[in-house]
Image: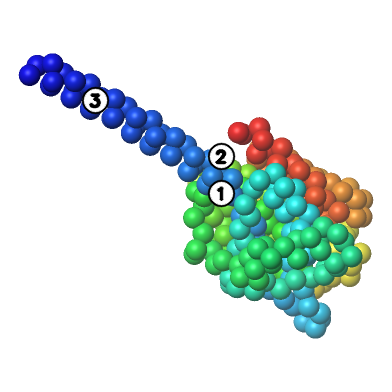
Amino acid sequence: MKNALKKIAIMIVVIATILSYHNQVFAQTKHSNTMKKILFVVTSHDKKGNTGETTGYYLSEVAHPWEVLHKAGYEIDFVSPKGGKAPVDGFNLEDTVNKKFWENAKYHTKIENTRKPSQIKPKEYAAIFYAGGHGAMWDLADNKELAIIAQKIYENNGIVSAVCHGPAGLVNIKLSTGKYLVEGKKINAFTNEEEIAVKLENVVPFALETTLIERGAKFEKSGLWQPHVAVDQRVVTGQNPQSAKEVGEAVLKLLSVKQ
C-alpha cells in the first residue's frame, strides 16, 4: 500500500513538472511571437491645407522600412487616426520596393484597412514607426491616443521611430515623468529648408524642425534631400524619404541588440 502511494506521488510530481515546463515554453513562445510585431502609424489626412492638392502617407516611407523589417521576420500592423483606408502620396510603382509592397496581397489589405488607435494593444509591439507624408502634419501631432500608445511602447523597453514628416507624431509625446520624449535626444526630421524648397512652409500648420527644437530636441540635419538618421535612447528618426530604408535598418539593429 505504501509503495503504491509512493509511486502515485512520484507520478504526480513528474506530471506537474512536465506541465510546468510546457507552460513556461508556451509563455515564452507567446511572448516571443508577440514581440515580433511592429506598429506602423500612417496619416488619415488627405489635403495640403487650402491648396487643393492631395496628400497622405508617402508610399516609399512605408514600403522601404517595411521591406527591411518584414524580411527580418517582423509582422507589421497599421494604425491611423481614423482607421480604415489610408490616403497615399508619392505613388510611384517604378520603385521596385514600392511595387513589392503595394502588390503584396496581405499588406495591401492591411494598409487599405488600418486599425483605429482604440483597437491597439501597446504591449503587443516591440516598436512603433511613424511614416511621413505631408498629411502627418495635420493629424498626428495632436492625437493623444497615438501619443499614449507610443509612450507605453517606449516605456516597455520598445523603440519609437519616424521619418520625414512622421516626427510630427513625436512632438507631443510625454513620458510618465512628464518630460517630452524628444527632450535631450538627437532627433531629425523634414527640415525647415526642405519645407521652403517644396514651397509649403506657409501651408503646413507648424514648422516641424522648429517645434522639435522647442520641445528640447537636439536637432540634427544634413543638406536638402540627403539621407540622415539619428539614433538616441531607442528613438530613431530620419530626415526625408531618402532616409526611410536607413531608419528601418537602424530600428532592426536596435531590435537585434535587445533579443
Relative depth, front residue between 130 and 143:
130
Q: x and y percent of residue 33 in the render?
A: 54, 45
Marked residue nearer the N-terminal end (2 or 3): 3
In the image, is 79 to the left or to the right of 209? left
Residue at the left extreme, as displayed: 1
Circle 1 residue: 125
C-alpha gap between disc 2 and disc 1? 10 Å
At label 1, the amino acid type is Tyr
Q: Residues within 10 Å of mark 3 (few under 14, many from 20)?
A: few
Counting from the top left corner in percent of width and height, residue 115 is at 56, 66
Q: Secondary structure at mark 3?
A: helix
**Mark 2 highlights which residue?**
157
Amino acid at dot 2: Asn
Q: Where residue 14 sits in the image (x, y, percent)?
A: 29, 25
Amino acid on which disc 3 is placed = Met
Find residue 117 and report its horizontal and vertical position in percent.
Answer: 54, 64
Residue at point 86%, 67% (across, down): 92
Q: Is residue 176 above or below residue 207?
A: above
* Quarter the C terminus occupies: top right
Which badge, 2 or 1, is on the more N-terminal residue? 1
Tell me, yes or no, whether the two marked residues, 1 and 3, touch with CB atoms within 8 Å.
Answer: no
Which image quarter holds the N terminus? top left
Location of residue 132 by image quarter: bottom right
In contact (CB < 8 Å): disc 2 and disc 1: no
Judged left or right of residue 57, residue 198 is: right
Camera-nearest residue between 30 and 130: 30
The residue located at (62%, 52%) in the rendering is 75
Above or below 90: residue 233? above
Say which mark, if any, is on residue 11.
Answer: 3
| Quarter of the rendering containing residue 197 | bottom right
